[in-house]
Amino acid sequence: MALSFPAGLAAQIAPYLPPASSSSPSSGHEDASRPFVTLTFATSLDASLALAPGVQTHLSGPLSKAMTHHLRAHHSAILVGVSTAVADDPGLNCRLEGADLARQPLPIVLDPHARWEVSENSRVVQTAKNGKGRAPIILTARDVVAKNDIHDDSSILQRQRLLEQYGGGYITVPARDGRFRWEDVLAALQRLGVRSVMVEGGGRVINSLLEEEQQGLVDAVVVTIAPTWLGQGGVVVSPQRTTTATATAGFVPPRLRDVTWVPMGEDVVVCGRL
Ligand SMILES: NC(=O)C1=CN([C@@H]2O[C@H](COP(=O)(O)OP(=O)(O)OC[C@H]3O[C@@H](n4cnc5c(N)ncnc54)[C@H](OP(=O)(O)O)[C@@H]3O)[C@@H](O)[C@H]2O)C=CC1
Ligand SMILES: Nc1nc(O)c(N)c(N[C@@H]2O[C@H](COP(=O)(O)O)[C@@H](O)[C@H]2O)n1
């Protein structure tokens, strides 16, 4: 069913959207050498994204869900980690009423080890096939593809052929210990012509983007907080501290600036900049 997002709420979110042109001088995003990055997710009162790894958990109410689709309409790409792709089998398209089908966001999946067995039955592929979204681009580690290249019938090649039918595919990114640097991820997106990306999750992806040395890469943060506790054992947003001297009285932890809280039904959406 098509979603609808009220204009009054859209106006309150507007200052946090990527500029229409990332080189616009009024945008506050002066670095046109990389896409504008929005970090966005839905969390419980105890900072959980899901009841357990691999368990899709609906936290957003109808209005905050529509807000996420409004964000999707204003970004050129949506990024998730492979465990989210596997757990949620997401559509990763914009389902707002009147959404411009020609301008659907490009789904990006971080899958260094090519673990996601994307197939004709995957929702994102079905969505692309039905003209309601785009096929995903999967970022994978160079050596994984190299190893598979030699086998003509390797499953990665089969998946690549499937995705190519709909305009998607694999691209390789350098990895260290199976991990990408965010600068390399954003450079790869920039080469694809992506001007803005919303990073939706899951926990590992968000926590790695919130590590201290990565924080300069996030332009806007839009977080839905739902009035529930998921309890221990959930997928929690709580980034590693990367310096040892941080847990001292004088340490000032990172804090959002230009903060706006927008009530949306039973949820509240907090917007800010890092
Ligand atoms: N409430 C919400 O808004 C959302 C909730 N979710 C939920 O979150 C859960 C999934 O979260 P989680 O289990 O943490 O998994 P993620 O979706 O964050 O995927 C994690 C995997 O992605 C790859 N990855 C992540 N960061 C990097 C990096 N910097 N470089 C290279 N690869 C990287 C790794 O793959 P590998 O292991 O192969 O190395 C890693 O194990 C699901 O239950 C889902 O439903 C997801 C999105 C939003
Ligand atoms: N905004 C938001 N609220 C929740 O409660 C969620 N569980 C999520 N999850 C994210 O949305 C993706 C699902 O997208 P589709 O509706 O299938 O297009 C899921 O993969 C998470 O990234 N988000």
Image (cartoon, helix red, strand yellow):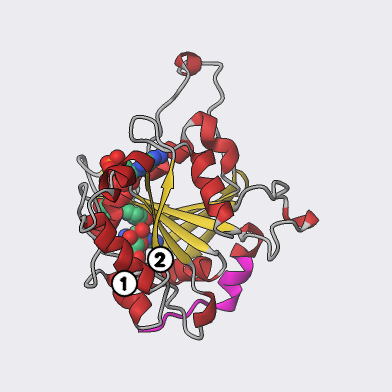
The residue shown at (28%, 44%) is: 113
Does residue 56 appear in the picture of this structure?
Answer: no
In the rendered structure, the answer to whether residue 117 lies left or right of residue 145 reads left
Which amino acid, by three-letter code, is at mark 2?
Gly
The answer for how far apart the CA atoms under marks 2 and 1 are is 9 Å
Quarter of the N terminus within the rendering: bottom left
Q: Left or right: where does residue 264 sit relative to residue 237?
A: right
- Determine which quarter of the picture holds residue 80: bottom left
Q: State which image quarter holds ligand 2.
A: bottom left
Residue 207 percent location from the top left of the image: 40, 38
Give the residue at mark 2: 168
Instruction: Give the residue drawn at x 43%, y 66%.
Output: 64
Neighbor class of circle 1 (other Cα within 10 Å; few <14, some 14-19, many 20+) is: many
Label pair 2/1, CB-CB below 8 angstroms:
yes
Residue type at tag 1: Val
In this view, the residue in front, 271 or 141, is 141
Is tag 2's residue or tag 1's residue first in the polypeptide sequence? Answer: 1
* Total residue callouts: 2
* Dot label at residue 56: none
The disc placed on residue 125 is: 1
Q: Which residues are magenta?
A: 1-12
Residue 146 position in % (x across, y down): 33, 44
As for residue 9 lying within the magenta part, the answer is yes
* Magenta segment includes 229: no
Question: In the image, is the residue at mark 2 within 8 Å of ligand 2 by its beta carbon?
Answer: no
At numbered mark 2, what does the secondary structure look like: helix, strand or loop?
loop
Q: Position of residue 150 (x, y in %)?
A: 26, 48
Percent coordinates x, y for residue 71 in the rendering: 52, 65
